Amino acid sequence: MRVPLRVSVSRWLISLGVLCTLSALVSAQHAAFRVKGRVVTERGEPIPRADVRLEAFYGYFAGTFAGQRTFSTTTDAKGLWSVGALQPGVWLFEVFAPNYMPETVVLPIRILTTVSMGTSGMALTWDLVLKPQRVSDDARGTLLTEAVTVARDKQVEKVREMLSRVPDDADADFLAGAARIALVARDTDLARPLFMRALERDPSSYRAAMGIASLFLLQRDFDSASRAFDATRNRTHDKDEQKFLTAAIGDLATIKIR
């Protein structure tokens, strides 16, 4: 029996639509970017041999992530590092260096960008500049240093016990450092009140504001994350920091538009 031409064309168009949708999904899964960055002191001096780690939490359109979700590298003598093949999504960046507190930040990486847009394999237009805080040479510094070791082993209960000893009179930098240790342990419930205490202690704290923005992004609360990144950008005069924060706000805006 012959199939009417109109029915054949309709079926063909439906099949073409399905193929285009599948092609777009495949493209989205295989979009990849190179991220570059620097690890420096507060005075801009390079920190060589720092351990830089990346972990994906969400993928394209902040949905389920598919692909290689962890990367690691080491800074060179100039404090530079570079990692390629990152797929779109929400990524956590961590830096560890001897005698420094860990530095962590969560950022969106072109979360609505696909290969069809012609950006696969290209480097992002910004460098991620991270400035770890030096550990103080006293009992408080020892507490945080020991907590870092435990946090890297993801011993959450032990980290909670250690950070429960954070002094009531701790300054904003100490509190933000403790909160970052909680993030290293992936304990966001512990990190949140510590970042909030740091911001209450010093409303101008860049580290505290960045931590809160990172937590909102991990919760996929994009509106709050965008506002928090904007507040963080207002707390720094570093042009490179302002640049990657502006890029984060722009990425989050694409979700709102969508």
Image (spheres, grey):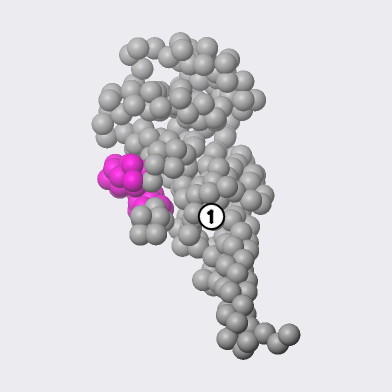
Part of the protein shown in magenta: 223-249
Residue 165 in the image, given as x and y percentages of width and height: 46, 11
| Rendered residue at 34%/46% (across/down) | 223
Q: Residue at image x 33%, y 42%?
A: 224
Residue topped by disc 1 = 60
- Foreground: 37 or 4? 4
**Closer to us: 200 or 236:** 200
The answer to whether residue 214 is seen in the rendering is no
Q: How many tags in the picture?
A: 1
* Identity, as a three-letter code, of the amino acid under mark 1: Tyr
Count neighbours of disc 1 (C-alpha within 10 A) and say few if under 14, some if 14 to 19, many if 20 or more: many
Report the side of 212 relative to 186 (left or right). left
Answer whether residue 253 is magenta in the image: no
Image quarter (top left, top right, bottom left or bottom right) of the C terminus: bottom left
Q: Residue at position x 34%, y 36% from top?
A: 209
- Residue at the image point whose x is 58% and y is 24% from the top: 151
Residue 188 drawn at (x, y percent): 47, 28
Q: Nearer the viewer, residue 8 or 84?
A: 8
Q: Position of residue 12 (x, y in %)?
A: 62, 80
Prevalent SS, magenta region: helix
Residue 32: name its quadrant: bottom right
